Image (spheres, helix red, strand yellow):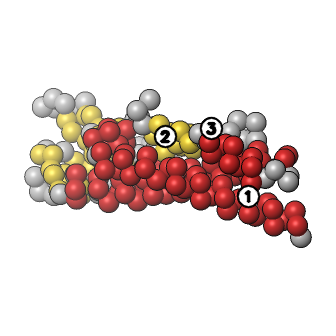
Amino acid sequence: MAGDVEVSFREDQFREVRRLLRSVPKAWPKVASRGINKTLSTLRSRFVKRTSAQAGIKQKVIREHVRIKKATRSVLSGLLRLLGGRIPLIDLKARQDKKGVSYTGRDGKRSSVPSAFIATMPSGHTGVFKRTTGSRLPIQELFGPSLTGVFEKTGDIQRETMDETEDLLEHYTAQEADRELERRKG
């Protein structure tokens, strides 16, 4: 899937981690998995902030559409997955005005949907709706872009995320290796 970022070691990085921990050979899977998991967590945080700033979507909504599959000691790779569903228009800072509903579009610019309205359903769900015919019913909820679409179209976010993956992985793995060696000494 295009919205996935996999974090794992290259062969040379893998050898380097094992070399650093040669005095404690059983510690390297723990160190490697912790380094990968910290990298994934940091990548998600940075991705959420960048996407929110660029697409005008609340960070909370983006975070709900991003999943982390953590590394374990036996599986030394992790995955940052973007869920593909479209984001409801109400989550794009929608507000009712005289002509319909306006919402924050790309780059923070407001767009509007004429004849749309904000309503709360009997179930408690609030959304932006539009009538599909001239009569009162049926109505249809309106949605914005999907997070994977935003990720693919904004090459800046995609490129920055991919570029910093290796640097973060090396940093956090070295940090965890130092931590483990220090713990073993003391």
Residue pointed to by mark 1: 177
Quarter of the image with the C terminus is bottom right
Please tell me which residue is depicted at 78% across the width and 52% down the height of the picture: 21
Select label 2 or label 3 by which is in front.
Answer: 3
Mark 2–mark 1 distance (CA, rounded to whole Å) = 24 Å
Q: Is residue 132 above or below residue 66?
A: above
Going from N to C along the chain, the mark reached first, 2 or 1, is: 2
Depth check: 50 or 87 in front?
Answer: 50
Residue 144 location, x and y as percent?
28, 42
- Counting from the top left corner in percent of width and height, residue 22 is at 81, 50
Q: Is the C-beta separation of discs 2 and 3 under 8 Å?
A: no
User: In this orientation, does residue 177 appear?
Assistant: yes
Q: Mark 3 points at which residue?
A: 11
Question: Which residue is outermost to the bottom?
Answer: 186
Q: For mark 1, does the 10 Å Cα neighbourhood hold few (<14), some (14 to 19), or many (20 or more) residues?
A: many
Q: Which of marks 1 and 3 is nearer the N terminus?
A: 3
- Specify whether 168 is left or right of 2: right
Label for residue 5?
2
* Residue visible at 62% across and 45% down in the picture: 13
